[in-house]
Amino acid sequence: MLSSILGAIELGMLYALMALGVYITYRILDFPDLTVDGSFATGGGIAAVMISHGYNPWLASVVAFAGGIAAGVCTGLLHTKGKINGLLSGILMMIALYSINMRIMMGKPNIAMIGVDTVFTSINPWILIPLVVIIVLLLMNWFLHTDLGLALRATGDNDRMIRSFGANTDTTKIVGVSLANGLVALAGALIAQQSGFGDLNMGIGMIVIGLASVIIGEAIFGARNVIQATIAVVLGAIIYRIVVALALRVGWLDASDLKIITAVIVIVALVFPTASRSIKQKKLAKRRTAELTGALQNGAAGGDLHA
């Protein structure tokens, strides 16, 4: 039990990088980007190919990050310059990336990294992974408080308003989507190195996992500001992996049920805040009704006494 929870925490921190990318598009830009499923595999494929051919794993991870940025730029250009719907832009790029990833992986559905050095070879994962997550969190929060980052946040809130102030919303959207997919690809590269292989289909369902992490984190820890929200996303990714690990320990569930477990978790995370607000509003309305009724009764009693 303990080993599975520790493994879930380790994997959750890696998935947190991907969830932070989803947070940028889903929450900050309000952009439904499905490129994630393709760019995650792009990062894993680039890392697996380069490392298996003797390249430095750190260099491979940086190139994977750049590959994700390139994928995000293409999605952003399709949406902003091609005037294609955001959702459709992501779907088109996700489909295109399947063939591109196959090319990157030289026509192989998976590439093993057995007997080669990875970023986890020389550094303990329990030191490296938290360090990477903390560095990414700090850099991301710093960026979101720069002029470009503030313009990015404003674009997601009201792009017409920010355009009226002279800002180029096309540029901010492209920057946001490319940065998001860069983080997703980096997560794919690190997870491929941690698991020992890169797979063509490793990105399937990543957008749902990312959304689950964002929603769970915000539902439990809140998101009053950007710093709190990004930390909540990281913790949400860890909690998601722990819940999945515990669910898979149930006797009648196995690894093939992972997708339905994810769907159930997302549904609960979406429904819980709404149901909680509804219950609170009903309690508040009942209390105010009781107070009003009491006040009317007291007023009526006072009137009878005067009479």
Image (tube, rainbow, N blue to C red):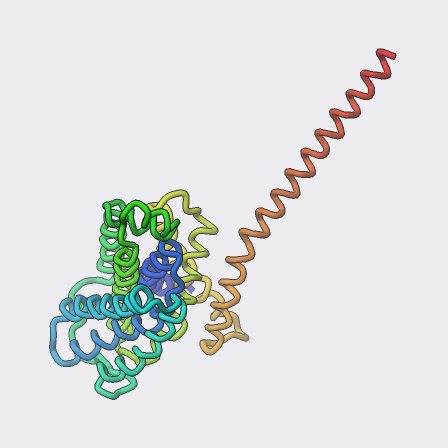
Residue 32 in the image: x percent, y percent?
40, 64
Q: Quadrant of residue 52?
A: bottom left
Q: Is residue 107 left or right of residue 1?
A: left
Q: Which sits in the foreground, 152 or 279?
A: 152
The reply to whether residue 187 is in sight is no
Q: Is residue 273 visible?
A: yes
Quarter of the image that includes the C terminus: top right
The image quarter in which residue 123 lies: bottom left
**x, y percent for residue 158:** 39, 49
Residue visible at 35% across and 75% down?
A: 92
Viewer-nearest residue: 41 or 98? 98
Above or below residue 282? Residue 9 is below
Name which residue lies at 16% across and 77% down: 50
Q: Position of residue 2 (x, y in %)?
A: 40, 62
Q: In which quarter of the image is residue 184?
A: bottom left
Residue 71 percent location from the top left of the image? 26, 70
Q: Is residue 303 above or below residue 269?
A: above
Q: Which residue sits at x=27%, y=48%? A: 166
307 displayed left or right of 253: right
* 108 vs 50: above or below: below
| Residue at the image position 86 percent from the left and 16 percent from the top | 304
